[in-house]
Amino acid sequence: MQKYLYLILLSVLIPACSPGAGKSAAGGKRVLTVTIEPQRYLLDRIVGDLFTVNTLVPPATSPETYEPAPSVMVELGKSEIYFMVGDLGFENAWSKRLAENNPDVTLVNCSEGIALMEEHDHDHGHAHCGADPHVWSSPQAVKLFVRNMLNALVKADPGNAEVFRANFDAFSAKIERTDSLIRDLLRDAPSRSFIIYHPALAYFARDYGLHQLSIEFEGKSPSPSQIRELVDAARKEKINTVFIQRGFDTKNAAVVAQEVGAEVFEIDPLRYEWDEELLKIAAVLARKTDE
Ligand SMILES: [Zn+2]
């Protein structure tokens, strides 16, 4: 029944939204879709001006809790390729519906071939540990991520394959430079551990020999005893940095920071300027503190 309604909705909305062209946005450019803003940045590096790239998750919204409206599904139907992060929030359940309703849209899992870490909170092992989807915090993982994008683009638009490949080579060199800049910054960081509200930096921490402790516990606000445990661990590890993120709770972070005498910094792992954000995070961790 739902599917039937959906088809009616599609037939009503599509002619109204895209006069004339089947798969072109206003201005005639072909359309690609990604889940989050850093992905749009990565894809823009490869396609240049050849495509318009849409992002599904609005700014300052957690992709883990975001539920796309039916109208978003209709918009997505105009896209040639939907580049998923992999298994982030709604993506998995949603991509099946998308594939059924829009058989012409190619689905690409950008995390394919990347060894996924298990998602941990506070390092407590628990039975329902899932894969950690935040691969884009690792420049080395992003090299594979972008290669998956390249492969799909070459298949979809072989006429521009040379352009895509040249852009890919140039951007791969930039990823390497970013990686070594971060390494240089973190070499003498005063503390190798940090606290973050939502654990979005596990791959970053792994790559650079850091320890991430999260305030959020299994996707929820922590209990007073969990905060106590975290504060104890933070004192032991001499943590001086607490990261908060746009779109997430900040009250618990302020409490923890005050308890351990750490500074609070706002970061945005969902920022469009992907490499600048990683460099900013590294610079915060590398800052000299008077002790
Ligand atoms: Zn997340």
Image: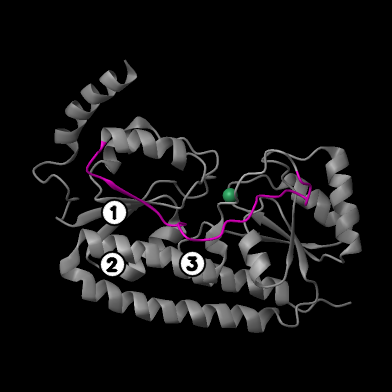
Label 3 crowd (10 A; few <14 / some 14-19 / many >=20): many
**SS at circle 1:** strand
Residue 277 spot, x, y in % from top left? 55, 67
Q: Tell me: 237 left or right of 43.
A: right
Query: Which residues make up the magenta segment?
Result: 102-125
Q: Amino acid at mark 2?
A: Val
Residue that label 1 marks = 32
Residue 159 spot, x, y in % from top left? 15, 68
Which is more N-terminal, label 2 or label 3? Answer: 2
Residue 108 included in the magenta stretch of the image: yes
Residue drawn at x 84%, y 45% is 227
Residue that label 3 marks = 142
Residue drawn at x 45%, y 80% is 174
Image quadrant where residue 11 sits: top left
Say which quadrant the N terminus sits in.
Answer: top left
Residue that label 2 marks = 47
